[in-house]
Amino acid sequence: MTSLRKFAIFGPVTDRLDISDLKESCFSKRHAVPGDLAQNNADVIILSGKTLKYAARFRTIKHVQQVWVPKRDFAGAVICFGRYVIQGRMAYGGVETLGGRSFLVFNLKDKKHRGISNRIFYPADIPPKVLLQGFTDHRFNYVLLRWQDHLDTLPADEDLDLLVSDDDALLIKNQLNARIGTRPLDLHTVSGTVKNVSDGLAYFPPHLSKELLESKKENADRIYIPNPKYHLLSFIYHTIYQKGDRSKVESGKGNRFYDQIDKLMKAEGVEFEITLENLDSYLETQGWKPAFDTLAKLSTNNTWLRDRLMKQFAEIQDTNITVFIFREVVEKWGNLQDLVKDIRDSDFKILREGPLDKNEVPRIAQGIRGGDWSQGNWPTDGGFPYYAVLVQDPMPVAPNSYIKKKSPFITNARPNLFKEKWRKKVNSGFPAEGKANFVHCSDSELEAYEYIQLIFPGEGEKWFSQK
């Protein structure tokens, strides 16, 4: 039998299959809905009967390595998986036996669509409190971000949201992945770039995550939670930037987001009308409003935030101005002037350039890239921002729908397209272990304006008044 050990079994085959030898590595369900197929950390999903039709949507099975189907359901398997085999996303892998039954095996090959998710799953027989108390006993550096008072009544399909140190994130994931899990837990890391855990975007700006973890407290249930001040700030952040109008917080009392914010505000002696705009202004006064480039990324799933940003910065669009920022690794490489020449030779008009004031680097770094200047998945650390080049593009390229979806405020795609090719070209001259993410650039004029204000204080209006 296959060496894969975590099974999720759906459909009538569960009634006739001997799975006693699988012990804690198996979850079975006679009746299923589409969401059930994705709500687990299985290596193998076994489908039979009517549950086969739910796998016709690839996203419900993309997290697994194999799908097994009873041989008697061959026709259904062809209908559901035939197109994926033709597309090269799945491949027929022969026959396996389990519990006295024979199954057709389909291997999932589409690793690109499988991706990395911060969602993991824990066993259904472990109550949320017991799970978190175990994390505390292991001295993991974590915080349960919200709904701490509702753990005893938490629905089985509702997720726990944990902020975890980068050092402990993979330890927690590996511990939970040892068993089949069906209850969701979202694991948010400080940097957002922990390999095999993070999806690339930090949940909070990293410096705020560090403050939140450093100030955590242990409650009566031996669970780490934010202190009252950070509980309020982090909950508001989640409500307005990650939920926006989907939170329906402005509907007033009876809405769980409104009621929780109202409760936390009263505990902290804070008083104002609870609206999305007022909450946004409050976070700004507390130093919890993120930089524009972070807000732009969050706005892709937040209509209220996207509309607010569009109105706020509408007057500085269509300048075709971009800021390229070289990182400290460039100083180590000693090729700064060659890189600046590359920009000039690519027909960008250089308006301003210069090194960053070393005393100001921490402040500047905190306001760009969401404060995340970590190594990420690159072999060599690129370091902090080091040198800035402000350019204007005389040959703008309109972004396609794919680029526009990732960066809704972008009007000129050429700087980013140039950056990606340039990064590959420059790194091709280094051995594998020496490659680094050496450059960052603004995605839009809106970001460029904020970068200029950070790097060259007071010059934003100067450059953006030149049409």
Image (spheres, rainbow, N blue to C red):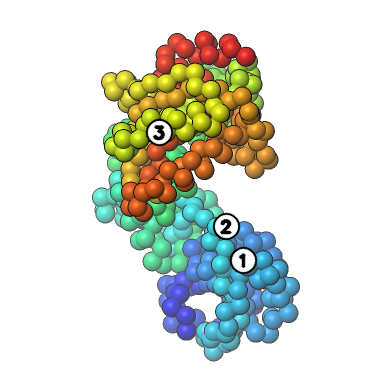
Q: Earlier in the sequence, mark 2 or mark 1?
A: 1
Q: Secondary structure at mark 1?
A: loop
Q: Image height check: is 160 above or below 102? A: above
Residue at figure coordinates x 54%, y 84% from the top left? 96
Quick one: label 2, few (<14), some, or many (20+) residues within 10 Å?
few
Q: Earlier in the sequence, mark 1 or mark 3?
A: 1
Between 37 and 104, the one nearer to me in the picture? 104
Closer to the camera: disc 2 or disc 3?
Answer: 3
Where residue 61 sits: x, y (%)?
Answer: 59, 64
Q: Amino acid at mark 2?
A: His
Q: Secondary structure at mark 2?
A: helix
Q: In the drawing, does residue 437 fall left or right of residue 405?
A: left
Quadrant in the rendering for residue 30: bottom right
Where residue 426 sits: x, y (%)?
Answer: 43, 43
* Mark 2–mark 1 CB contact (< 8 Å): yes
The residue at which mark 3 appears reads as: 338
The residue at which mark 1 appears reads as: 89
The residue at which mark 2 appears reads as: 113
